[in-house]
Every structure is written in structure tokens, then in C-alpha cells.
Amino acid sequence: MTETMTPAPVLTLSCPDNFGIVAAVAGYLTETGCNIEQSAQFADRETGLFFMRVEFDLGATARLDEITAGFSPIARRFDMDWKIHDAKEPLRTILMVSKFDHCLIDLLHRMERREFNISICAIVSNHRDAEKIAVHHNVPFHHLPVTPETKPEQERALMEIVKQQDIELIVLARYMQVLSNEFCEKLPGRVINIHHSFLPSFKGAKPYHQAFRRGVKLIGATAHFVTADLDEGPIIEQEAERVDHSMTPGDLIRIGRDVERRALAQAVRWFAERRILLNDAKTVIFR
């Protein structure tokens, strides 16, 4: 007989700020026999929105589906955007990559070491360079080449994988293609990208070489949600390293790859732990 795993529920919510939200949430969980293990909340005075994340234990008799159904009246009363997740369920994820594989390999390694609870259901690429990596890690590989003419067809194929695999998150682990506005709008808050944001003036090819010629003193990377506005999505995490005149372009590339890996891994970890809530063009992250 297979033993049933006890859920580890996490409630996340956002709504217009009002009196009594925390009391209503805590009261409901207490009345249903649940025990709050961790709670965090934030009221944004600028937007007038309230955000909350609660980890709780179901207790001896409560059931997750019943707790979820019973919370709906409270959510309606406060006009909440909410969800109760089971933290023990691995986050079903697609990794997308082009030719630079350092972020891809790092995420695969962290997953296998169980640093965060995700299930990589597919690796998608517009090139075949990462196919051997996918085979080595026993992850299905999908080669979806793209040109301006075939972009709509390629994105339809990608969306079909998302639907078939019940994907919650897409990670652009140095995927060097721009997703269409239509695709981004179908998956709001579910696509994360890594971008060398501390080199904003160095667009185009070889940004680290351009940075070297300008003598920059700081390089870094930003993990952010993908939106229809290119590289303007809500920021999740940023990493930076100081550099100096003695470093070569190769040194900057090496350091840049390190900060890209760190920033992207942290963003994926927070997403998997349900710590990120969207706040218009920004994010609220309960660490």
C-alpha cells in the first residue's frame, strides 16, 4: 500500500488593503483545525494593496480540498487574488535555452541536489546544443527552431507542451529569443528570464567586451518576470560583483555567468516556495 504524503499548504493572497484581513485568515484556519506555522504580510501604501503568505499545518482531521473550498467566501469578501498550494508538490517547470548552457546546467544540478522542489519536465531549445545535456539528465528535449516566419508556429508548439505537461513555470535560462506579446499575455507571472541588467547601455553583441572597453566597475544580472515590454518585467532578484581595470573580457564573462546563475537560481527557489507576489510592475517577496 502506498503511503499518502501529508500536504504542506501555503496560502498566498493579494487584495485591496482593509481592516480585518489577517484576523479573518487566522480565524478561519484556527476554526478549521489548522495551525499557522509561518505568516508574513505587507501593506503597500502607494498601491493600496495588501499581500500575505501563510504556511500552515492541516492538523489531524482537516483536508486540503475542504480547506480550499471553505476559504472562498473570505476571499470574495475581501476581493482576494489567492491560491493555496501544496509545497510538497514539485513545481512543474520547463527550461528554455539557446547555446549558453551555464544557467541550464546549474538549475539541473540544484534540482538533483534537491536545493529546491521543482520537476524539470522538459528542456526546450531553438538549437540542438543542449540535447546531450538533456539526455544525460534524463529530461525530455524539444528542438523548436525559430525564424521570424515560423515564430507563431514555434510558440504554438511550445504552448502545447505547456498544456500537455501542466507546466506552472517557464525559465528562460539564457534563451536568446524574444517571446511574442501574445505568448507573454497567456502566462502572466509564470515566465522568468535572466538578464545582464547592470550593463543596460551595452546592447547587442558581446556586452561584456563593450563593458571592458568602457572600464565598468560593477557588473551584475537581474532575474525578472517576462512581459510584453522587453526586459521591463517585474524584478525578482539582482546580483552584482565589483570588477576593476586588471580584468580581461574573459574575466568579466566568467564573473557575469556566476552572477547570472545565482540570481536565476534564487528566483526559481522563491517561486517554487510561493514567496513571490506580483505588485503591478514590482514584486513582493516574503523571504
Image (cartoon, rainbow, N blue to C red):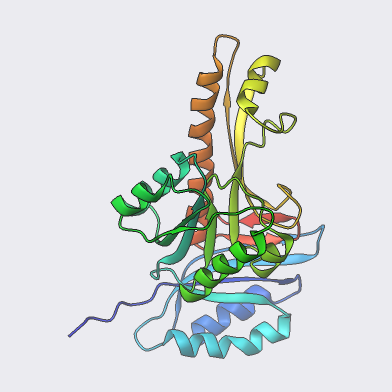
Q: Position of residue 246 (x, y in %)?
A: 55, 9
Q: Nearer the viewer, residue 133 or 262?
A: 133
**Residue drawn at point x = 59 percent, y = 14 percent:** 244
232 with respect to 22 (left or right): right
Q: Is residue 269 above or below residue 80?
A: above
The quadrant in which residue 239 appears is: top right
Q: Position of residue 76 (x, y in %)?
A: 70, 86
Q: Residue furthest left?
A: 1
* Residue 8 in sight from this viewpoint: yes
Q: Nearer the viewer, residue 84 or 239?
A: 239
Q: Residue furthest top?
A: 246
Q: Position of residue 186 (x, y in %)?
A: 67, 69
Q: Residue furthest front?
A: 149
Q: Nearer the viewer, residue 2 or 46?
A: 2
**Residue drawn at point x = 45 percent, y = 39 percent:** 102
203 with respect to 67 (left or right): right
136 with respect to 236 (left or right): left
* Residue 32 in sight from this viewpoint: no
Q: Position of residue 235 (x, y in %)?
A: 66, 49
